[in-house]
Amino acid sequence: MNKKRRTPRCPYCGGEMEMHEPLYWIIYWSCATCAAKAPTCETREAAYKAALRRYNGANRVLSLAEIDSRVGEPVCLEDYDEDGDLCYRTRTVTRQEYESHRIYFNSGRKWYDANEYLSTWRCWLREPTREEMEAMPWEMKHNEH
Ligand SMILES: [Zn+2]
Protein backbone atom coordinates (compact mmCIF):
# COMPACT_ATOMS: atom_id res chain seq x y z
CA MET A 1 0.00 0.00 0.00
CA ASN A 2 1.02 3.55 -0.57
CA LYS A 3 2.13 5.71 2.24
CA LYS A 4 -0.34 8.32 3.33
CA ARG A 5 -0.17 11.09 0.77
CA ARG A 6 -1.53 14.57 0.81
CA THR A 7 -5.02 14.99 -0.53
CA PRO A 8 -5.17 17.12 -3.68
CA ARG A 9 -6.83 20.47 -3.12
CA CYS A 10 -9.39 22.02 -5.40
CA PRO A 11 -7.88 24.69 -7.69
CA TYR A 12 -11.03 26.81 -7.41
CA CYS A 13 -12.29 26.73 -3.85
CA GLY A 14 -9.43 25.03 -2.00
CA GLY A 15 -11.67 22.18 -0.82
CA GLU A 16 -10.51 18.59 -0.52
CA MET A 17 -10.70 16.46 -3.63
CA GLU A 18 -11.86 12.86 -3.76
CA MET A 19 -10.86 10.08 -6.13
CA HIS A 20 -13.51 8.58 -8.39
CA GLU A 21 -13.10 5.34 -10.25
CA PRO A 22 -16.27 4.65 -12.23
CA LEU A 23 -14.43 2.04 -14.31
CA TYR A 24 -11.07 0.53 -13.55
CA TRP A 25 -9.38 2.44 -16.36
CA ILE A 26 -11.26 5.72 -15.83
CA ILE A 27 -10.00 7.53 -12.79
CA TYR A 28 -10.26 11.17 -11.82
CA TRP A 29 -10.34 13.40 -8.77
CA SER A 30 -13.05 15.93 -8.15
CA CYS A 31 -13.82 18.48 -5.48
CA ALA A 32 -16.23 17.38 -2.77
CA THR A 33 -17.36 20.98 -2.32
CA CYS A 34 -17.79 22.52 -5.77
CA ALA A 35 -17.48 19.46 -8.06
CA ALA A 36 -14.55 20.86 -10.07
CA LYS A 37 -12.92 17.98 -11.89
CA ALA A 38 -9.27 17.16 -12.50
CA PRO A 39 -8.26 15.45 -15.77
CA THR A 40 -9.40 11.85 -16.23
CA CYS A 41 -6.56 9.32 -16.40
CA GLU A 42 -6.13 5.60 -16.88
CA THR A 43 -4.24 4.85 -13.69
CA ARG A 44 -4.59 5.96 -10.09
CA GLU A 45 -1.06 7.26 -10.07
CA ALA A 46 -1.56 9.41 -13.18
CA ALA A 47 -4.90 10.72 -11.91
CA TYR A 48 -3.36 11.67 -8.58
CA LYS A 49 -0.52 13.49 -10.29
CA ALA A 50 -2.91 15.26 -12.66
CA ALA A 51 -4.99 16.50 -9.71
CA LEU A 52 -1.88 17.84 -7.99
CA ARG A 53 -0.39 19.32 -11.13
CA ARG A 54 -3.53 21.26 -11.79
CA TYR A 55 -3.36 22.79 -8.35
CA ASN A 56 0.31 23.64 -8.69
CA GLY A 57 -0.13 25.18 -12.13
CA ALA A 58 0.12 28.94 -12.40
CA ASN A 59 -3.03 30.85 -11.69
CA ARG A 60 -4.13 33.20 -14.47
CA VAL A 61 -6.96 35.29 -15.82
CA LEU A 62 -9.16 33.31 -18.19
CA SER A 63 -10.09 34.45 -21.68
CA LEU A 64 -13.76 34.87 -22.60
CA ALA A 65 -13.49 31.78 -24.77
CA GLU A 66 -12.23 29.79 -21.80
CA ILE A 67 -15.14 30.99 -19.68
CA ASP A 68 -17.49 29.95 -22.47
CA SER A 69 -16.00 26.47 -22.48
CA ARG A 70 -16.46 26.10 -18.72
CA VAL A 71 -20.23 25.90 -18.49
CA GLY A 72 -21.12 24.11 -15.28
CA GLU A 73 -17.68 24.68 -13.81
CA PRO A 74 -16.63 27.16 -11.18
CA VAL A 75 -14.39 30.13 -11.83
CA CYS A 76 -13.15 32.76 -9.44
CA LEU A 77 -14.79 36.03 -10.45
CA GLU A 78 -13.14 39.30 -9.46
CA ASP A 79 -15.01 42.61 -9.53
CA TYR A 80 -15.81 45.65 -7.42
CA ASP A 81 -18.13 45.46 -4.44
CA GLU A 82 -20.59 48.19 -3.36
CA ASP A 83 -17.76 50.13 -1.73
CA GLY A 84 -15.66 50.10 -4.89
CA ASP A 85 -13.16 47.63 -3.49
CA LEU A 86 -11.95 44.69 -5.51
CA CYS A 87 -13.24 41.40 -4.25
CA TYR A 88 -13.57 37.91 -5.64
CA ARG A 89 -15.89 34.99 -5.20
CA THR A 90 -16.35 31.60 -6.75
CA ARG A 91 -19.18 31.43 -9.26
CA THR A 92 -20.34 28.69 -11.60
CA VAL A 93 -20.54 29.51 -15.29
CA THR A 94 -24.12 29.06 -16.50
CA ARG A 95 -24.18 30.23 -20.10
CA GLN A 96 -23.25 32.98 -22.46
CA GLU A 97 -25.94 34.84 -24.35
CA TYR A 98 -24.13 36.01 -27.46
CA GLU A 99 -26.69 38.53 -28.68
CA SER A 100 -26.92 40.49 -25.44
CA HIS A 101 -23.25 39.92 -24.56
CA ARG A 102 -24.37 38.66 -21.19
CA ILE A 103 -22.54 35.88 -19.41
CA TYR A 104 -24.67 34.26 -16.75
CA PHE A 105 -23.40 32.69 -13.55
CA ASN A 106 -24.88 30.68 -10.69
CA SER A 107 -27.85 29.28 -12.63
CA GLY A 108 -28.60 32.64 -14.20
CA ARG A 109 -28.99 34.61 -10.97
CA LYS A 110 -26.12 36.88 -11.87
CA TRP A 111 -24.83 38.15 -15.20
CA TYR A 112 -21.91 40.20 -16.40
CA ASP A 113 -21.41 42.11 -19.64
CA ALA A 114 -18.89 40.45 -21.95
CA ASN A 115 -17.99 43.88 -23.35
CA GLU A 116 -16.82 44.92 -19.91
CA TYR A 117 -14.61 41.88 -19.51
CA LEU A 118 -11.13 42.74 -18.23
CA SER A 119 -12.17 46.34 -17.52
CA THR A 120 -14.74 45.93 -14.73
CA TRP A 121 -14.67 42.20 -14.04
CA ARG A 122 -12.55 39.17 -14.83
CA CYS A 123 -12.30 35.50 -14.00
CA TRP A 124 -9.40 33.59 -12.54
CA LEU A 125 -8.66 29.92 -12.78
CA ARG A 126 -8.79 29.84 -8.99
CA GLU A 127 -8.73 32.21 -6.06
CA PRO A 128 -6.00 34.78 -6.74
CA THR A 129 -3.61 35.99 -4.10
CA ARG A 130 -3.23 39.73 -3.56
CA GLU A 131 0.14 39.56 -5.37
CA GLU A 132 -1.42 37.82 -8.36
CA MET A 133 -4.20 40.40 -8.54
CA GLU A 134 -1.77 43.29 -8.35
CA ALA A 135 0.58 41.75 -10.91
CA MET A 136 -2.24 41.58 -13.46
CA PRO A 137 -3.26 45.12 -14.43
CA TRP A 138 -6.78 45.87 -15.58
CA GLU A 139 -7.40 47.05 -19.12
CA MET A 140 -8.08 50.73 -19.36
CA LYS A 141 -11.45 51.55 -20.68
CA HIS A 142 -10.59 53.71 -23.68
CA ASN A 143 -13.11 54.72 -26.33
CA GLU A 144 -16.67 53.55 -26.00
CA HIS A 145 -17.81 52.08 -29.27
ZN1 LIG B 1 -13.80 23.12 -5.18
Image (cartoon, helix red, strand yellow):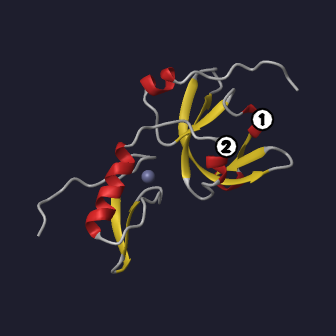
Q: In which quarter of the image is residue 51?
A: bottom left
Task: Indicate whether 131 appears above or below 94.
Answer: above
Does 82 sit left or right of 134 as displayed? Answer: right
Cα separation between marks 2 and 1: 10 Å
Count residues near mark 1 (Cα–Cα under 10 Å), then give few for <14, some for 14-19, many for 20+: few
Of pointers 2 and 1, the one earlier in the residue sequence: 2
> Which element is circle 2 on?
helix
In this view of the protein, which residue sits in the foreground, 25 or 124?
A: 25
Q: Which residue is drawn at 60% across and 59% down?
A: 72
In this rendering, the answer to whether 63 lies above or below 96 is above
Choose between 87 and 135: the one closer to the eye: 135
- Any part of residue 9 in sight: no
Mark 2: few/some/many CA within 10 Å (<14, 14-19, 20+): some
In the rendering, at what x and y percent does residue 113 appear? 76, 38
In the rendered view of the protein, which quadrant contains the N terminus? bottom left
Amino acid on which disc 2 is placed: Leu
Q: Residue at x 67, y 23 (%)?
A: 139
Mark 1, residue position: 115
Residue identified by numbered label 2: 64
Give the residue type at disc 1: Asn
The picture quadrant where one finds residue 44 is bottom left
Percent coordinates x, y for residue 100 in the rendering: 85, 45
Residue 66 location (% of width, % of height) = 61, 48
